[in-house]
Image (cartoon, helix red, strand yellow):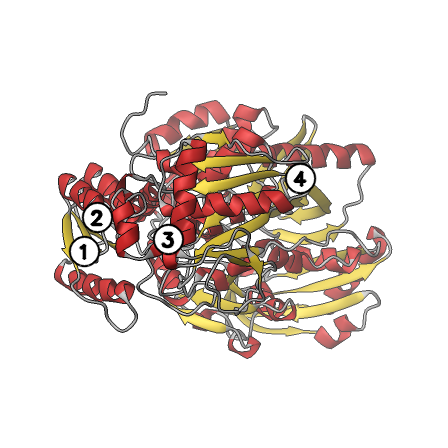
Amino acid sequence: MPYQSIVDAIGHTPLVKLVMDLPNAVEVYAKLELQNLYGMKDRVARQAIVEARRTGELAEGAPVIESSSGTMALGVALVGARLGHPVHIVTDPRIDPTTHAKLRALGCRVHVVEAMSGAGWQSARLEKLEELIRDLPGAFWPRQYSNPDNPGAYRLLADELLTDLGSLDILVGAVGSGGSLSGSARALRQSLPDLRVVAVDCVGSVVFGQPDNPKRLQGGLGNSLVPANLDRSLIDEIHWLNDHEAFEATRALAREQQIFAGNTSGSVYRVLHDVARRAAPGSRIVGIFPDRGDRYADNVYSDDYWAERSLTALPVAAEPTEVTPGTEVATWSYAAQRLPAQEPRTLLFVEANTSGTGVLALEMARRLDLVPVLLTNAPERYAGAPETGCEIVVCDTSTEKALREVISERFPRNHIAGITTTSDFYVPVVSRLAAWLGLPGNPPQATEAARNKATTRELLAAAGVGQPGFAVVRSAAQAAEAIDRIGLPCVVKPADDSGSNDVLLCRSRTEVLAHVERVLSVEVNVRGLPTARTALLEEYVEAPEFSVEMFTDNGVPVCMGITAKTVSPGPHFVEQQHIFPAPLTEKDATALRETAAAALAALGIKAGPTHTEIRLSERGPLIVEVNPRLAGGMIPELIRLATGVELLEQQLRAACGLAPQLAAVREATAGIRFLAADRDGVLASIDGVDEARLVPGIERVQLTAAAGRAVRVPQNAYDRLGYVIAEGDMAPSVVKSLHEAVRQLTVRVGES
């Protein structure tokens, strides 16, 4: 098929069934990554450089530098040069003449270190690279050994395997930087949780606990350092081959399969024979073949080289010997067990909400044996966070680029169990970071579409999902035209704010134009993040409002229940009371559930909690908005009281790839009534709290505002002063308890 550029042609490599005499209908395939223009690392170079350009880490025309003696160097040269970047490659004397010639031909500056340092050639190269970084301002280093874009590049390889085969049982791959096997396995296990993963290493490599031998001859696999991108918890079995065994297997691959490859592919080929011999009947096995043979013509395929290095003096094993992990090996051996992660299971939180749920989530992470880390630019925002024992990292959270930098610097990928947020504003960036790290989460485009209500409206319209009439407005001229189309009264609101902020019912043309001007003038939100500078004009629908609380697991939305909402009549829409579950007929409940599910499908939501607000009109259910997060307004607490399901815990479990526990364990009803000022001024006191707590059915009375605070008649959720929660068997008794408790409370407001 035609491609627009050489960069677009990366990937799409052949999958070939190998000719092997195998019993029990076992099938073995070779994924010929060596068919990329220069090799498998073309994928990594493209992912790392394109992502760095997207996030702003790599400026137009800035240098790209990398430490490599093989295919990563060529991949960086290919992508960097094509996208207009000077490329510097740091390598060592082991680089083969063919690779060196290709790099020079591609216009690279090649820096060859002269001697090993204390930790071998690898550390010597890294020392030279650090020197280049100092001398080349703005230079980008793809950091193939620690950059999550390395394993992230292989999600496409996994997709190709699933497209070609549908399923497979065993994946075999070599380990150098750790990216290809970890990334492919992690992505495949999302669809194939029982996939068995076999790693191929070399004798003299420290990756899996062997003593280092810097003079080992194999290129492309093995390492003198343990790469941060290697996730050992994904691996079920490790094989080691010595130089003689690897080189001999590479020649056998060419002779038996007509695949002229490098020693990494040869090692994988040898291991495939053993894995296939021991596999269950009907197993489908794939080996990743990363390197072509041209750069090995003067060593692997040279009899003179073999004689010069006395390769035939090394012993050769016809079959591998099973050993326990940590046993020093000299010939083909394997350790047949999954290695434990042996690392902290860190759960990263990117900011949080300030209603208390954020701090509760940090505490809950501890109960799940996770290590919570809060990334925030304002730790003082979260009262009680230090007492949870979480690590607080003060950093710039305003851009994906800044967050990627701090995560890469401080947290090895194999330490990170998940990433999440309890703040509406950070859901899209968290989904992008989860995708970058290969962690569970929603597709970024889905959360971005849900977060921007203008995009939501357009997608729902295309899918035929019921919603009010609307117009997307980015200028006063568009607003004037939209009024005629939508009619009056209408609702004007920002496309990407939260908590009913700046949502206004407008009854005149003058009101609409004035409020549109206000919305469009707001450049940053309450968290200092840039706004979309977009307003929505929406048909005003007078109808009861509900919210459908869903939790999507493996792409299947599960309805946790429906909340009946009492909202102020306007001009501001502020939630005053919630009852869960809503007292509804089965017909109405079904209609609400089906509409919410259709909205999630239209947006592409695949995972985690969602909160969909709907008005049940005479025309049927009409979507108000879809929130790709847990409900606010203490609705998760109502769900806990009514069903026994702690949704916040399920969010944390899902973020770490743990199965959520969504089955209800009780049937009850819970409700909340919010406290608010009836006039503008200064809060003097809220009296009657003790009396309210004594009302039968009351579970909690909570004040969230202190005396002396300026208050007003509510215009958004931030103006609420506290709440009362009740529980009971049925909705009428809960409403009665809430009414009686609020009757005991007096909100006293003085003059400002």
Instruction: Note whether 453 is above or below 678 in the view shown.
Output: above
Tag 3 or tag 1, which sits nearer the N-term?
1
Tag 3 or tag 4, which sits nearer the N-term?
3
Residue at the image point whose x is 46% and y is 46% from the top: 268
Residues 100 and 557: in front is 100
Residues 472 and 104: in front is 104
Q: Mark 3 points at which residue?
A: 400
Query: Horizontal and vertical percent for residue 141?
Result: 26, 55
Q: How far apart are marks 1 and 2 (CA)?
A: 7 Å
Find out whether the residues at labels 1 and 4 contact each other: C-beta distance under 8 Å. no
Find out whether the residues at labels 1 and 2 contact each other: C-beta distance under 8 Å. yes
Query: Horizontal and vertical percent for residue 560?
Result: 72, 47
Q: Distance between the residues labelled 1 and 3?
A: 18 Å
Q: In this view, does 36 lie to the left or right of 507?
A: left
Instruction: Note whether 228 is above or below 542 in the view shown.
Output: below
Find out whether the residues at labels 1 and 3 contact each other: C-beta distance under 8 Å. no
Q: Mark 2 points at which residue?
A: 59
State the residue lying farthest toward the right: 729
Q: How far apart are marks 3 and 2 (CA)?
A: 15 Å
Q: Which amino acid does label 3 sit on?
A: Glu
Q: Name the residue under label 4.
A: 556
Q: Is residue 714 visible?
A: no
Tag 4 or tag 2, which sits nearer the N-term?
2
Q: What element carries label 3?
A: helix
Q: Is mark 1 on a helix, strand or loop?
A: loop
Q: Which amino acid does label 1 sit on?
A: Gly
